[in-house]
Amino acid sequence: MLEQLLPEVNWDNVWLAASETLYMTGVSVLATFILGIALGLLLFLTSKGNIWENRLVNGITSAFVNVFRSIPFIILIILLIPFTKALVGSMLGANAALPALIIGAAPFYARMVEIGLREIDKGVIEAARSMGASTGTIIWKVLLPESMPALASGITVTAIALVGYSAMAGVIGAGGLGNLAYLEGFQRSNSQVTLTATVLILIIVFILQFIGDFITRRIDKR
């Protein structure tokens, strides 16, 4: 059916490119979730009036986050070429896109985490501190559970952004649907391949949004 409808599309290449996009997105979302929460917690806890209040650490962390979330992704990939080559050994393939994807998305998500933590009722945190709860207990029993709907919503937005980032990375040889659309679609004037890659990216985005919204509704007890 698909072969008859779009005869100029090599479907083996399409499914390979789709699997590469899913791989890049999945790995980078997982790493971004972990690093983003760590950075967001550090930003929140070292801010004024909080448990680890420290202007120097907060200022350095905030500057790091602001710099890397402000650099356009395509420029970030170029800036990270020496680091990526040292880490992965190549600038080609799905693995080569991962450092830029993670470094580009983690600071973005960290700000969302910080905003989510700031929305927590300070009275809940103060009550835990007055009962003698350790910092670890406050983080795991108060901060993360109370902010979980915001964290889930934030990682959904970030995951969708990462799909777009992975498509941009594909243009410079990182593989995936972006690479397919550029090499086999744009450069060979094959509009069927470009259309197919675009539709598959949209399907991935819609699925991610649906899953994210479903999880957010399930864990939001308000």
Image: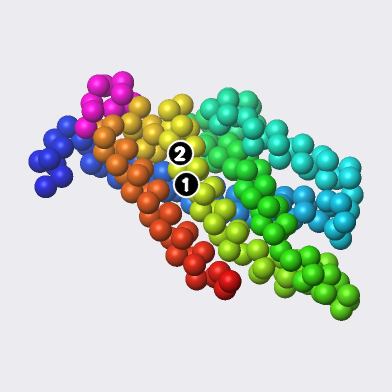
Q: Main secondary structure of the magenta part?
A: helix
| Total tally of numbered discs in the picture | 2
Say above or below: 206 vs 176: below
- The residue drawn where x is 33% and y is 31% is 181
Question: x, y percentage for residue 222?
Answer: 58, 71
Question: x, y percentage for residue 202?
Answer: 35, 44
- Left/right placement of residue 211 relative to residue 181 reads right
Give the residues drawn in magenta, as a range.
183-192
Residue 170 got which mark? Answer: none
Amino acid type, mark 2: Gly
CB atoms of marks 1 and 2 within 8 Å? yes
- The residue drawn where x is 50% and y is 43% is 162
Q: Quadrant of residue 183?
A: top left
- As helix, strand or loop, the secondary structure at mark 2 comes to helix
- Left/right placement of residue 96 relative to residue 135 reads left
Say above or below: 134 vs 191: below
Which residue bears the numbered disc 2?
A: 164
Q: Quadrant of residue 104?
A: top right
Whether residue 187 appears in magenta in the rendering, the answer is yes
- The residue drawn where x is 87% and y is 56% is 49
Question: x, y percentage for residue 4?
Answer: 10, 41
- The residue drawn where x is 60% and y is 58% is 151
Q: Is residue 60 visible?
A: yes
Which residue bears the numbered disc 1?
A: 160
Say above or below: 26 vs 73: below
